[in-house]
Each structure stands twice: as structure tokens, then as C-alpha cells.
Amino acid sequence: MMKLLSTVVCVLCLLGLLAWLLPAAQAESVHVSEGWFATISNCTSYDYEPGYNPETGEFQWTYLTYEGFMISPQYCLSTTTSVLEPVYLPHDPWLNTTSGVSIHMHDGWVDTVLDRVTASPASCVGDEMWYHVSFDWSTSWSDSPAAQYLTWELWAGTGSGWDVAWRVTPGAGYHQGHVDMDVPLTFIGSPGFALSFNPVPEPSTVLALLCGLGGLTLFSRRRRWN
């Protein structure tokens, strides 16, 4: 009975691992259709950062607010392919900022690993002790493999590393949402949004993988105890 149960757990673990790895390995490119879009809008950043007080001759932490995205420099909004065309939403000509970014899709193929759009919101770069961000997102897609792979992400420095602070893979149809979150410690650079076509593992797949690995660990310990 124990051998049978051990075999079932092994199979579950392998199926979870394969379900996680195979989509990314199989999908080298997906077809994108004209008229699809994705947006990040109403983006506001709040930072605590060091500032010099000339009256006291000391540094003090200052609370600052940054609205939207900077129109320049050019690298603040970039794409790896002409199929994904990022454009700024209507902007303030005096401040040279915009409330958001819209990514328009043209008919063609995109690489699921290499192709992406990156956009940097207006924010401090480097020394702030605390970072908060709020924004709206939306996507509109027809039912296709591309809709399954589309991923919006917010990358930021968290502690001493650089990682995904927020992520959504909405799928086909029209979807929208609002995000209001803290991102602790952004010492190594300002945060940035990335739209790509890397599939995120489904919760059920991850659960199966974790259950299988946990079961294998438990059985290995029991065998040692016996």
C-alpha cells in the first residue's frame, strides 16, 4: 500500500512539474491581432527620500509625489518589436508628463521569451527608504494563445534584489483593475512596468507541484525513520 501511495505522489509531482515547464518550452511565438491593447494609467508614485536642509545643515527624509510617466528620455518607454507599439496617453505639455501608457497591437508574431514593452513611471531613482504606487490597468484581447501568455508586471528593487512586485495575467476579453500597494525598499533603481508574453503557472499547477514535492519529502523521511 505504501509503495502504491508513493508511486501516486511521484506521478503527481512529475505531472505538476511538466505542466509548469512545458507551456514555456513549447511556445516560442504567438500571434497577435490588430486592435488588441493594454494600458497602465493614472499612475502615482509616493516616495520617502533623503533631502538636505540648508537651515540645519542636516539630511532629512522628505515625502514626495510623482504623477504619471515622464515623456523623456527615450529609454523610459521601449519595445523590442514593431508588433507591440507603446504610446503615451495625452500629456501635460508644461510638465512633459503623461498619466499613462497604452500598448497597441499590430498583426504579427511575438516571441514569448524575448519580446516585451517596458515603461518607467516618474519616480525617484536610488535612495528612497519607502515606495508606494497606485495605478489602473486594462487589457482587451480575443480568445487566443496570446491572451493566455500576456502578462503585466511591475518590477522593483525589493531589499537588495530586483524582482516582480505585482503581476497579472488576465486572459481573453476585456479586463481592468486598480492597484494600490507598498513596495518596500527600492535602493537599486526606480520601478518599471513590463508587458510580455511569458505564461505564469496556474495556481492549480503550482499546488500540484508543491504537494508532490512535499509528499516525496515526507516519504523519504519516513523511509529513513523506518
Image: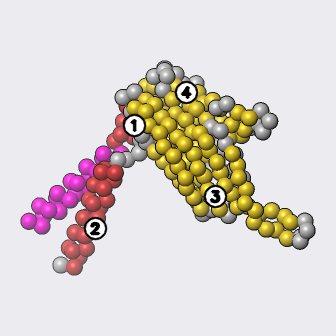
Where residue 171 is drawn, which disc sits there?
A: 1
- Residue at image location 39% in from the left, 33% down from the top: 172
The span picked out in magenta is 1-21
What is the residue that sits farthest to the right in this orientation? Answer: 55
> Amino acid type of disc 3?
Tyr
Q: Residues within 10 Å of mark 4 (few under 14, many from 20)?
A: some
Q: Nearer the viewer, residue 193 or 18?
A: 193
- Residue 144's place in the image compared with 127, above or below, is above
Q: CA distance from mark 1 to mark 4?
A: 16 Å
The scheme the figure's colours follow is secondary structure
Q: Estimate the x, y position of residue 99 in percent, counting from the top left.
A: 65, 38
Q: Where residue 116 sits: x, y (%)?
A: 54, 36
Residue projecting furthest to the left: 1
What element does badge 3 sit on?
A: strand
Mark closest to the chain's N terminus, 1 or 4: 4
The stretch drawn in magenta includes residue 3: yes
Find the distance from the CA under tag 4 to the CA under tag 2: 47 Å
**Quadrant of the frame with the C terminus:** bottom left
Q: Earlier in the sequence, mark 2 or mark 1?
A: 1
In percent of width and height, residue 173 lies at 40, 32
Q: What is the C-alpha distance between the residues marked 2 and 1?
A: 35 Å
Looking at the rendering, which quadrant does residue 207 occupy? Answer: bottom left
Q: Circle 4 sits on which residue?
A: 104
Query: Residue under circle 2?
Result: 217
The CA span between labels 3 and 4 is 29 Å
SS assignment at label 1? loop
Residue 131 disc label: 3
| Mark closer to the chain start, 2 or 3 | 3
Q: Earlier in the sequence, mark 3 or mark 4?
A: 4
Mark 4, mark 2: which one is toward the viewer?
4
Specify the amino acid type for callout 4: His
The quarter in which the N terminus is drawn is bottom left
